[in-house]
Image (spheres, coloured by chain):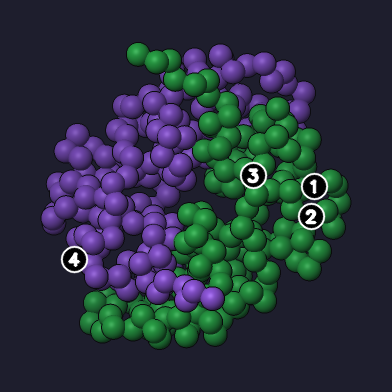
Chain colours: A purple, B green
Amino acid sequence: MQARDLAVAYPTVRMDTDALTAARLLTEHNRPGLIVVDDKGHPIAVLPGSQVLRSFIPAYVQDDPALARVLDEGFSDEICAKLADHTVEELVPKDRPLLLIANDDDTMLEIAAMMAGNRSPLVAVLDGKGKDASLLGAITAHDLLGAILPPPVEA
Amino acid sequence: MQARDLAVAYPTVRMDTDALTAARLLTEHNRPGLIVVDDKGHPIAVLPGSQVLRSFIPAYVQDDPALARVLDEGFSDEICAKLADHTVEELVPKDRPLLLIANDDDTMLEIAAMMAGNRSPLVAVLDGKGKDASLLGAITAHDLLGAILPPPVEA
């Protein structure tokens, strides 16, 4: 079994996608993060869900989370306005968490070793080779475990 | 809205749970990791899915993932045996990734600030106060976004 057999479609954004769109994609797909692709569809970064939250948290609360306690929570409309005002580019961590990238013919064990070695829950799989290759899909640690484990024996 | 309103049941293991059981829980619940609880049900660590993979990858492959390419992949039975031979305690990273812990009356904005500040996709919520308080559930970044965002306007 190779990477191409395990890869599933994964939600993507671009650097200029607004954060409100990114937030909606995250909630619709029930994923821990989004893959950021360039204009050619080549994967370049990962946007963790936790970073989308940053866009509507006032800076002084990020510095001291205890301050969140005293803030009024009636600010749902404000949050959407703030999300719409930011782009993915502003939210991708500057020291970007590594986006692991596999080739479509990498083996199951190669993918497992990449994830384990980098403590990453996600590997992007390219459709073909090279720096312009587009995204075929992605493999998560639990998808990989599901493919490896035999089905449980019925009691 | 407070942490107790957002927390959902989350799969847990103990330090002496075997890795095969942990692997099955991960695949059944479609979660990026498991929460490790002590004998009193108090959350103490997080076990990322990527770390479960470590238990069946030979050490020399972890050191050099390229070696995975030359290994025979007909080793599925072996994998289960290797998983059953390890415990969660052996797989939780020694420099444990921070498990964020919230109280049940923490506000939505407090939770968001914790996640954003620590780049964590997951916060465990205690049922009550103190170091022996048991786990009420957990909140993920995308659950939180789902609770915050208003439903999309129908076209």
Please name which of the two marks, 4 or 2, marks the residue nearer to the observer.
2
Which residue type carries mark 1?
Asp
Tell me the subunit letter for badge 2.
B
Task: Indicate which disc, 3 or 2, sits on the residue closer to the N terminus.
Answer: 3
Query: Do marks 3 and 2 share a chain?
Result: yes
Tell me the subunit letter for badge 1.
B
Residue B96, image x and y in percent? 62, 63
Q: Which residue is mark 3?
A: B8
Viewer-nearest residue: B38 or A28:
A28
**Above or below — where is A119 with respect to B87?**
above
Q: Which residue is mark 2?
A: B134
Mark 2, secondary structure of its residue: strand
Mark 4, secondary structure of its residue: loop
Which residue type carries mark 4?
Asp
Residue at image x 56%, y 37%? Answer: B143
Q: Is residue B48 visible?
A: no
Mark 1, secondary structure of its residue: strand
**Above or below — where is B81 with respect to A101?**
below
Residue at image x 49%, y 21%? Answer: B151
Q: Which residue is mark 1?
A: B127
Which residue type carries mark 2?
Ser
Mark 3, secondary structure of its residue: loop
Tell me, for residue A105, which label it has, or none: 4
Tell me the CA gap for discs 3 and 2: 14 Å
Residue at image x 35%, y 67%? Answer: A147
